Image: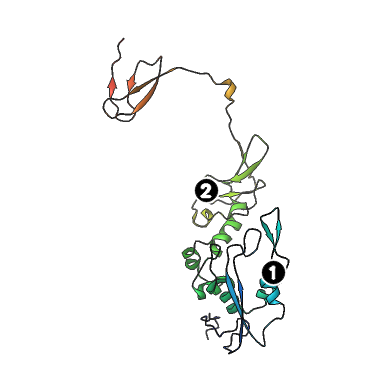
Amino acid sequence: MNNKIKSVDYNEKICFKCLKEKDNIHTYTLGYRGYGSGFDNFNTILQLCDDCNHGELSIWFNEEPELIDGYCEDYKYEDNIFEFVKSLPIQGRELFENQCARGACSYPMESQDWIDVELGVAPDSIYKEYGMYSPSEIKAYEERFPTCENVYLKTYKDGSGSCRCDYGAYGEKDGSCGSNISDECYTCSHYKKKGFDYSMREEKELYIEKGKLKRIEMYEWTCEVCGEIIHTHIHSEDFICPKCYQYYNDYE
């Protein structure tokens, strides 16, 4: 038996809560909110029948924000909207958050894909199709990065640092996983589990003090073959173009 939760198609009569088609539908529009709002650049609608309607939704959806520092919008009822949306069945949430959503901060997906991702049942290929980290990639990073002997500590002049490996993965200074996923761990063939004698190596960032650098004089000249502009040390006896390798004799 297939127990997969199926998405529903939007129409003007469907209630996002009971998912039934009703003649008397209340529609609430959410849009044109700006910086500071949890719905910044995210426009959508909520449809409810008489039985599922909430009396304060009109107030929540239509409130005017308080401006902080003249530009940051603060809505005191947004948490109420978020909590109400959480109470919807997942198909209703999909209608609100995906199928009916518009704006720069909406990321449209196929309705069934959205539901499968939310439920954690989508295959890895679906995550990659939408540029998302798959559960397999996340698991590999969480399991491999903290236990791999290729991980080392990179420290900087100001005392800060982070852990990394030579194959592209990054983490926190103490060797734990970072908040950003490194998908390199998933396909890495260099993974080697830490042994009992493992000791994390430290690599310090190298710096050059500009005050100790020596100024030198250079000749600037142009290659007559390829037109490359070249700088050569005044004590050099060789005038060779690094682009076309043309050699030149010098004379006074």
Q: Amino acid at mark 2?
A: Gly
In the rendered view, would you say 12 is above or below 246? below
Label 1, label 2: how far apart the Cα atoms are: 47 Å
Q: Amino acid at mark 1?
A: Glu
Decide if residue 97 is on the left or right side of residue 62.
left
Within the image, what quadrant is residue 222 found in? top left
- Secondary structure of the residue carrying tag 2 is loop
Residue 17 or residue 179, whichever sits in front: 17
Mark 2 is surrounded, within 10 Å at the Cα level, by few (under 14), some (14 to 19) or many (20 or more) other residues, namely few
Residue 44 or residue 131, whichever sits in front: 44
The answer to whether residue 199 is seen in the rendering is no
Q: Which residue is mark 2?
A: 168
Within the image, what quadrant is residue 21 found in? bottom right
Residue 3 or residue 53, whichever sits in front: 53
The answer to whether residue 241 is seen in the rendering is yes
Q: Position of residue 162 (x, y in %)?
A: 63, 44
Q: Position of residue 220 (x, y in %)?
A: 38, 21
Residue at the location (49% across, 61% down)? 131
Q: Which residue is mark 1?
A: 63
- Eye-nearest disc, 1 or 2: 1
Residue at the location (58% across, 20% down)? 212
Residue at the location (53% across, 74% down)? 99
